[in-house]
Image (cartoon, rainbow, N blue to C red):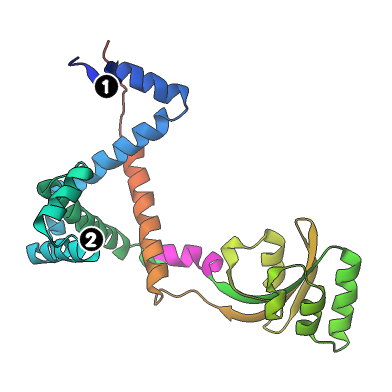
Amino acid sequence: MDANALLIVDEKPLSLRQCLKYLQLSGKLQGFIADILRQYVLEQELETRADLEINTAMIEQAVVDFRLQNQLTDPQSFQDWLARNGSNYELFHKQITGSFKLEKLKAQLAEARLQEHFIERKIMLDRVVLSRIVVESKELAEELLSQIHEGNSFEQLAREYSKADERVANGMMGPVSRGTMPDGLRAAIDSVEPGGLVGPLQIENYWAIFRVEQVLPATLDDNQLKQTMQTEIFDRWLAEKIQTMTVKLQVPE
């Protein structure tokens, strides 16, 4: 076996230089290097920071829970699963420990920055409950808007005319994050109170009338949102760490 081979494909050795060349030709070399740097930084942090120690009992319980969830309670079936996945108990245990440490690191990094980051992002995180009527022409949209102003039912017109799937629910879209809205819609909604109408607005090849049903302000009491914020802070921290590093690609001859 060739000692310099990184891979053996159909008994043919591929050197590290060849593999890097293929990555470069496919446009994936930069992503490959970025993944390596990410893992390097994480390994250094997780192994050197004393404030990330995890209770052993918690790790063992996580292993037990995993085996129960995946029907691997039999020792031999668990060993077979580890072998099929190119792992062993020591490596698996290390991965579980690393995942706990990583979550603890994210929480610690976010603790001092969470409120500030939330305030920066809040305007895009607030959600608005919307209903809409979507039609193919501006003229029809304007006619329907006039009918609504004259007292006709928004819900009835949505069921009769709207091309959107929500027509079966009287036009109700449900909560929409401000950050995912088209710029024109987001700007128009800013000046409308619940119950108010927006439009007609052109959305791609259609015209739409929106009704604001309810505004749902983002809050850190939302655990899912809080976790998203923590991940964003962590990713920013990690990118900043990598940017300060001096990296040179050394390819053996």
State which tag comes first along the sequence, 2 or 1. Answer: 1
* Viewport quadrant of the N terminus: top left
Q: Which mark is residue 154?
A: none
Q: Which structural element holds mark 2? A: helix
- Helix, strand or loop at disc 1? strand
Question: CA separation, marks 2 and 1?
Answer: 39 Å
- Using the rendered view, name the quadrant where residue 158 is placed: bottom right
Crowding around mark 2 (Cα neighbors within 10 Å: few <14, some 14 to 19, many 20+) is some
Q: Disc 2 marks which amino acid?
A: Lys
Residue 193 on image: x %, y %? 68, 82
Nearest to the observer: residue 39 or residue 248? 39
Going by the numbered disc 1, the residue's amino acid type is Ile
Classify 53 as above or below 217. Answer: above
The reply to whether residue 145 is in sight is yes
Is 217 in front, or is 77? 77
Task: Using residue 43 as the reference point, say whether residue 222 is left or right of it.
Answer: right
Q: Residue at x 42, y 62 (%)?
A: 117
Q: Are marks 2 and 1 in contact (CB under 8 Å)?
A: no
Identify the residue under disc 1: 8
Placement of 28 over or under 225, stated as above or below: above
Residue 66 place in picture, x, y as percent: 21, 62
Helix, strand or loop for the magenta stretch, by majority: helix
- Circle 2 residue: 104
* Residue range of the region highlighted in magenta in the rendering: 116-125
The magenta stretch spans residue 123? yes
Can I make out residue 49 in this image? no
